[in-house]
Image (cartoon, grey):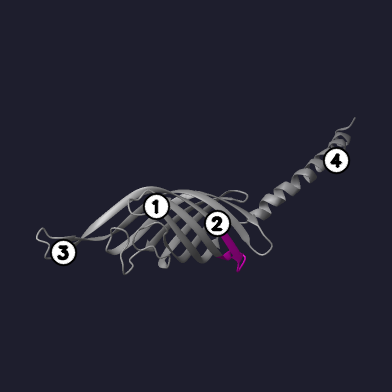
């Protein structure tokens, strides 16, 4: 048997194997055509269980830094800040209350007809800071003292991204956060902004 006839006989099984593997490889490539994502979002939110200052119309911002780990699965770092300085104060804080957070976790995405939806679970670090009014011993005047509370937390959220361009999309997020603060434990936020893929 010649060498050329051996190659001819092994070529059809090899071609059949390629045909079997090609759809999966093409599917993975079609799922994610990028590696990194940067998102800039603005939004509103607040605490659901605080004694004072439980409004959800406090404004904030969030920066998303995402990495595609495999098809439809992303690792995303979220850095955010939410102002909680209402007229009535927030919990034990009387002025300039603010929530700062950093969360990281996995997000699973799937494609819908006109957009991409996702759900994520993240661990994070949260800091609540502001000013607390303290009266003098005589009680005839008071001063504002800086107060800070730092605690771990957990975030659960859903996302939706609507394509605007091949690498740009409108990103919408709704999230709930559980944090072990003294004044408040449950926070809800909604964000919207632009996501750019690289």
Q: Looking at the image, which residue is at 52% across and 55% down?
A: 157
Disc 4 to disc 3, C-alpha distance? 87 Å
The region drawn magenta spans: 158-170
Q: Nearer the viewer, mark 2 or mark 1?
A: 1
Seen in the picture, residue 12 relative to 177 is either above or below; the reply is: above
Q: Which mark is residue 142?
A: 3
Q: Earlier in the sequence, mark 3 or mark 1?
A: 3
User: Crowdedness of circle 4 by 10 Å Cα count: few (<14), some, many (20+)?
Assistant: few
Q: In front here: 25 or 133?
A: 133
Disc 3 to disc 1, C-alpha distance? 28 Å
Q: How many marks?
A: 4
Q: Earlier in the sequence, mark 2 or mark 1?
A: 2
Circles 4 and 3: CB atoms closer than 8 Å: no
The residue labelled by disc 1 is: 185
Q: Position of residue 11 (x, y in %)?
A: 84, 40
Q: Looking at the image, which residue is at 87% across and 36% down?
A: 9
Q: Which mark is residue 158?
A: 2
The residue labelled by disc 4 is: 12
Q: Looking at the image, which residue is at 88% across and 32% down?
A: 2
Q: Residue 56: which quarter of the image?
A: bottom left
Circles 3 and 1: CB atoms closer than 8 Å: no
């Amino acid at each position: 048997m010649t060498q050329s006839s051996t190659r001819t006989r092994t070529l059809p099984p090899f071609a059949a194997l390629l045909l079997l593997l090609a759809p999966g490889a093409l599917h993975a490539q079609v799922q994610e055509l990028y590696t990194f994502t940067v998102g800039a979002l603005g939004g509103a939110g607040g605490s659901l269980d605080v004694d004072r200052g439980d409004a959800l119309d406090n404004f904030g911002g969030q920066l998303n830094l995402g990495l595609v780990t495999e098809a439809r699965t992303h690792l995303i770092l979220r850095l955010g800040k939410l102002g909680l300085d209402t007229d009535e104060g927030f919990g034990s804080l009387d002025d300039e209350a603010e929530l700062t957070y950093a969360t990281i976790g996995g997000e699973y995405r799937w494609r819908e007809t006109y957009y991409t939806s996702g759900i994520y679970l993240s661990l994070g670090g949260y800091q609540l800071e502001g000013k607390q009014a303290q009266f003098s011993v005589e009680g005839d005047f008071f001063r504002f003292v800086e107060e800070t509370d730092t605690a771990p937390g957990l975030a659960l959220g859903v996302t939706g991204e609507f394509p605007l361009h091949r690498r740009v999309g409108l990103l919408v997020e709704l999230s709930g956060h559980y944090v072990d603060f003294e004044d408040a434990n449950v926070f809800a936020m909604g964000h919207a902004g632009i996501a750019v893929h690289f």
